Each structure stands twice: as C-alpha cells, then as structure tokens.
Amino acid sequence: QVQLVESGGGLVQAGGSLRLSCAASGLTFSRYVMGWFRQAPGKEREYIAAVTWSGGTTYYRNSVKGRFTISRDNAKNTVYLQMSSLKPEDTAVYYCAARNVDRNDYGYWGQGTQVTVSS
C-alpha cells in the first residue's frame, strides 16, 4: 500500500520560511518523479514543483521560482520543499504526489499539510 505523508506545515509570517517533507512508503521511490501541489480555498489545485527520480532536474511554476526549492533523498524515501520569502498568497494546503517514470499522471497523493502565511 502506497502512502505519502506530508509534514512541516504551519503558520508563518510573510517573509518567513518553512520546509515541508513528504515521506513515501510502499513504492520504489527512485522510480517516481515527485511533485508538490497546492490548493487555496476556492481555487483549483495547482502544480508547484517537481523533481526527477535522480534529483538532477527540477521544475517550478513561475510564481515560486527563486523562493522555493524542491529536493529529494532517495535513501530516506523523502521529498522536501524548502519555502522562503513566503507571501500571504502562498497560503494553501500543500500536497505531495508521485508519478511513475513510465506514466504521465500523478497516481499517488498525500493527505496534505496546511501552510498559512500571515501579512
């Protein structure tokens, strides 16, 4: 049974930092692209960042480039999202997801962790 468990969310002031973690189990972690998504109240879920199986290539949506960093530790089956210079508009539930390297869709999702940025 595949499980993705996020942690590290919380309340932070604008300009602050948080690091999210996502621990994966039940899958061959190194065969999965890992991504982070978020969903704000009343809005659709949106893609934030992704990292390839080796960690060698990363992708970001424009609004978080230079502020967020995605990374992974395959020995720990964990993916991270380091967030800095946080803005109130970053407030959302953040989800990690896993996409098998042979597929185009993210087939596994975590339960989400709340990030709230106060102004």
Image (cartoon, helix red, strand yellow):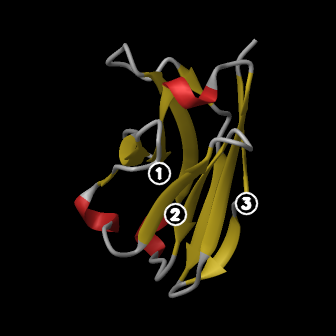
* Residue at x 37% of width, y 19% of height: 105
Query: How many numbered discs?
Result: 3
Q: Is residue 112 above or below residue 83?
A: above
Q: Residue 8 carries which label?
A: 3
- Tell me the amino acid under the disc marked 1: Ala
Cα distance, mark 2 to mark 3? Answer: 14 Å
Cα distance, mark 1 to mark 3? Answer: 17 Å
**Label 3 Cα neighbours within 10 Å, binned few <14 / some 14-19 / many ≥20:** some
Q: Earlier in the sequence, mark 1 or mark 2?
A: 1
Tell me the residue that label 1 is attached to. 40
Q: CB of mark 1 within 8 Å of CB of mark 2?
A: yes
Judged from this view, the residue extending furthest toward the left is 62
Q: Residue 43's spot in the image, x, y percent?
A: 38, 45
Q: Earlier in the sequence, mark 1 or mark 3?
A: 3
* Residue at x 51% of width, y 88% of height: 15
Q: Looking at the image, which is closer to me, 56 or 116?
A: 56
Disc 1 element: loop
The answer to whether 36 appears left or right of 66 in the picture is right
Note whether residue 43 is visible: no
The answer to whether 105 appears left or right of 107 in the picture is left
Mark 2 or 3, which is nearer the eye?
Answer: 3
Q: CB of mark 1 within 8 Å of CB of mark 3?
A: no
Tell me the residue that label 2 is attached to. 91
Note whether residue 67 is visible: yes
* Residue at x 28% of width, y 65% of height: 63
Mark 1 or 3, which is nearer the eye?
Answer: 3
